[in-house]
């Protein structure tokens, strides 16, 4: 009896190894399932990769816009701070006399906005000659506001002759977006300029 049980066990053991031994390759269904799983993994990986690339491009674009805006703000502050006389002061246009090149003559400097497509651009003029686009992708053309003191309310526009050459503080505010259809990507940059020659 033990002998028969032992032989039956060997027989089942041999049949199992024979089945495995003679099985060559995978069935068509197994290959299709593996291919489908690999395609799903590749699709998910490619979507994650593309989203990472897009996020990186957005971050670089925003950093460049912020750098451009801060550079423009710095140069404007420097020229406006040294102004000796205001010729025009509106919310989208400022014109003044300043000695920017440190010679004996004062230059007439003007900053104003123009509509360009769906955005505004900030243009700089020196002595009536357009020196080019100073800043792109402005959402609003309301960039200048004028104050008698830092903690006072803004002066109502248009400025009269008295306020034109007596205001002490100019606030410059930029709202930038190179993709205006996405309002959540707006970049806000502002600064206040305290005029020295007043």
Image: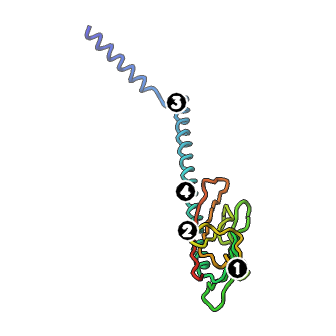
Q: Local crowd at mark 3 within 10 Å, few (<14), some, or many (≥20)?
A: few
Mark 1 highlights which residue? 87
Which residue is found at the position 65% from the left and 57% from the top? 179
Q: Judging from the image, what secondary structure is the residue with disc 2 in?
A: loop
Q: How far, Cα to Cα, is label 4 from label 2? A: 39 Å
Mark 2 highlights which residue? 151
Residue 191, horizontal then vertical, whole percent: 57, 69
Q: Judging from the image, what secondary structure is the residue with disc 4 in?
A: helix
Q: Earlier in the sequence, mark 1 or mark 3?
A: 3
Residue 72, horizontal then vertical, whole percent: 60, 72
Which residue is found at the position 50% from the left and 30% from the top? 26
Q: How far, Cα to Cα, is label 4 from label 3? A: 39 Å
Q: Earlier in the sequence, mark 2 or mark 3?
A: 3
In the image, farthest residue toward the bottom: 104
Position of residue 149 in the picture relative to residue 105 (left or right): left
* Location of residue 122 (image quadrant): bottom right
The residue nearer to you, when weighing 178 against 83, is 83
Mark 3 highlights which residue? 30
Q: Given this view, does label 1 or label 2 mark the residue nearer the observer?
A: 2
Which residue is found at the position 66% from the left and 90% from the top? 105
Q: How far, Cα to Cα, is label 2 from label 3? A: 75 Å
User: Can the viewer see residue 132 in this picture?
Assistant: no
Q: Earlier in the sequence, mark 4 or mark 3?
A: 3
Which residue is found at the position 31% from the left and 14% from the top? 7
Q: Earlier in the sequence, mark 1 or mark 2?
A: 1
Res 56 label: 4
Q: Given this view, does label 2 or label 3 mark the residue nearer the observer?
A: 2
Query: Which image quarter is the C terminus in?
Result: bottom right
């Amino acid at each position: 009896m033990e002998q028969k049980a032992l032989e039956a066990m060997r027989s089942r053991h041999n049949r199992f190894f024979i089945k495995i031994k003679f099985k060559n390759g995978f069935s068509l269904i197994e290959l299709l399932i593996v291919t489908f799983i690999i395609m799903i993994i590749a699709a998910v990986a490619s979507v994650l990769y593309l989203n990472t690339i897009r996020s990186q491009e957005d971050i670089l674009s925003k950093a460049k816009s912020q750098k451009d805006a801060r550079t423009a703000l710095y140069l404007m502050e420097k020229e406006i701070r040294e102004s000796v006389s205001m010729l025009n002061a509106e919310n989208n246009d400022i014109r003044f006399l300043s000695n920017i090149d440190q010679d004996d003559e004062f230059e007439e400097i003007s900053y104003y906005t123009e509509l360009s497509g769906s955005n505004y651009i900030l243009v700089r003029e020196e002595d009536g000659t357009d020196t080019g686009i100073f800043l792109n992708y402005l959402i609003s053309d309301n960039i200048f506001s004028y104050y008698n003191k830092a903690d006072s309310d803004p002066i109502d526009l248009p400025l009269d002759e008295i306020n034109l050459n007596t205001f002490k503080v100019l606030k410059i505010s930029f709202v930038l977006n190179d993709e205006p259809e996405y309002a959540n990507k707006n970049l806000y940059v502002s600064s206040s300029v305290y005029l020295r020659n007043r």
